[in-house]
Image (tube, helix red, strand yellow):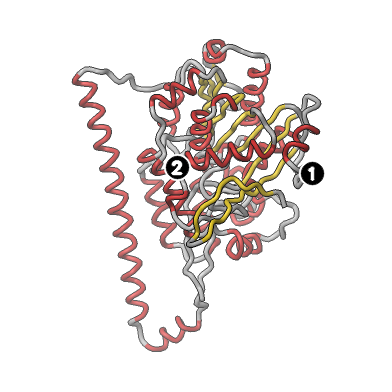
Amino acid sequence: MPYCEVDRYQNGDEWDGVRLFYRRFGRGATKVLLVIGLAGTHDSWGPQIKGLTGSLEPAADDEESGDAAAAEGDDGDGIEVCCFDNRGVGRSSVLPHKSYYSTVIMARDALALMDHLGWKKAHVFGHSMGAMISCKLAAVAPHRICSLALLNVTGGGFQCFPKLDGQMLSLAFRFLRARTPEERALVDLETHYTKEYLDEKVGSCTRRTILYQLAGAARSKPLAREYVKGISSTGMQSNCGFEGQVNACWTHNMTTKELDTIRSAGFLVSVIHGRSDIIAQLCHARRLAERLIPVARMVELHGAHLVSHERPEEVNNALMELIKATKSMMKPEEWSSQPENSSETGALISARPVSVTIRTDDGGNAAIAVYNLLAKLQLSFLYVIGVILMGFEHMRNIVKVMKPKQNSCKLLSEPSRRPGIFMSPQYCGDDGFRIASPKTS
């Protein structure tokens, strides 16, 4: 299996290596590194791998040394793609403490992988948490970046909290009430995809069948229950890995100096986002794109958090356009000065993101203070709602235990282990809700 040792850490009295699992696809002089988001694995990039290389078949020489493989694939006009599992998920190393996880550390992991592959430069495309990692990589090693694409990105910290509205509260309530992997998976679908997309794909089927279809692998058994069973037994992210990656998102922040470094490095940037994303809000992506002008272009698509799956053709076109513009040595001013337009498929391309201009006078400072206060109040409100719902569930469990003996016998006859599920489909994997199932002996 293709692994790359990117770091070492102290585990008790011993030092262990941090290994990343990766896959390479296609052949060519154009190198593309794909960085996935929270709780996602390399499989999540399926639509983009297919669109960029034309095949989902991994390179046959994955286990060869990086330098030799890279030298062999440098001929031709094709595209070579590498995607990998971040530390803490999939087949990569799971480190025992959240201090081993940050977007800076994981950016260094990606850089070490590029060294292992023998890639001097690459186009770096990241999704969600992977886009945060890509930003740090571009700030740490701008000379290694050909271009940068940020899909469904936020600025980390409070910006990682989802949009607080009726839909989100309803999903959170259903998420806590769900008792089976199937119920939880259905909530996950509605979190990551638009209702229109699900309705369109469902047709005469049920959404449970769509869950299998989105998993997409022909090698999988053609039943959603088999897919869910497989995820429950082998695909769920560990507590350490999940908490570590959440810590990386929460502590992520791009300083003005880092943004200046990206803006002055000379490579082009695309910020691609779904308008209906309730996990990573569109306003944060617009604000980041605005801060990266003149090298950044904002591409808004009709879709939700997994817009790369909802609108694969449009996303792939945007990525290919970025690669072609880089090859033609288009100047950043030309890249960002193209007129705003809307395609037939609903893509809105703009170099000037719609945003509120923040003044620097007293009124502007007051507005900023109010905005920050509201963000904190929103976070507090989320915590309060969560505590109330968890308390409600706890009381229900107490009532069940105190029921008459016949009911207790019924409870004892149920399986002691409730299957958990890694909430994003393994093929779609992303940074949505995640369920931690009870530990078993």
Secondary structure of the residue carrying numbered label 2: loop
Disc 1 target residue: 61
Identity, as a three-letter code, of the amino acid under mark 2: Ile
User: What's the amino acid at mark 1?
Assistant: Asp
Mark 2 or 1, closer to the camera: 1
Q: Position of residue 126 (x, y in %)?
A: 56, 36
Side of 280 where 115 appears, left or right: right
Asked if the residue at tag 1 contacts the one at tag 2, i.e. Cβ–Cβ closer than 8 Å, the answer is no
Above/below status of 242 relative to 255: below
Where is residue 385 shown, x and y percent of the image? 30, 54
Left or right: residue 167 compared with residue 39: left
- Residue neighbourhood size for the residue with mark 1, other residues' Cα within 10 Å, grouped as few (<14), some (14–19), many (≥20): few
Query: SS at mark 1?
Result: loop
Choose between 155 and 426: the one closer to the eye: 155
Q: Which residue is painted at 44% across and 57% down in the image?
A: 175
Is residue 96 shown to the viewer in this render? yes
- In space, the residues marked 2 and 1 are separated at their CA atoms by 37 Å
Quarter residue 371 falls in: top left
Q: Furthest residue to the bottom?
A: 405
Would you name the residue on which mark 2 appears? 279
Give the x, y percent position of residue 231: 60, 60
Residue drawn at (64%, 22%), measured in percent from left and top? 321
The residue closer to the viewer here, 342 or 306, is 306
Quadrant of residue 232 within the rendered picture: bottom right
Task: Report the disc number at residue 421.
Answer: none
List x then y, in percent, for residue 92. 60, 52
Pointer 2 local density, CA inside 10 Å: few below 14, some 14–19, many at least 20? many
Closer to the chain start, of discs 2 and 1, is 1
- Determine the residue positioned at 51% across, 59% down: 238
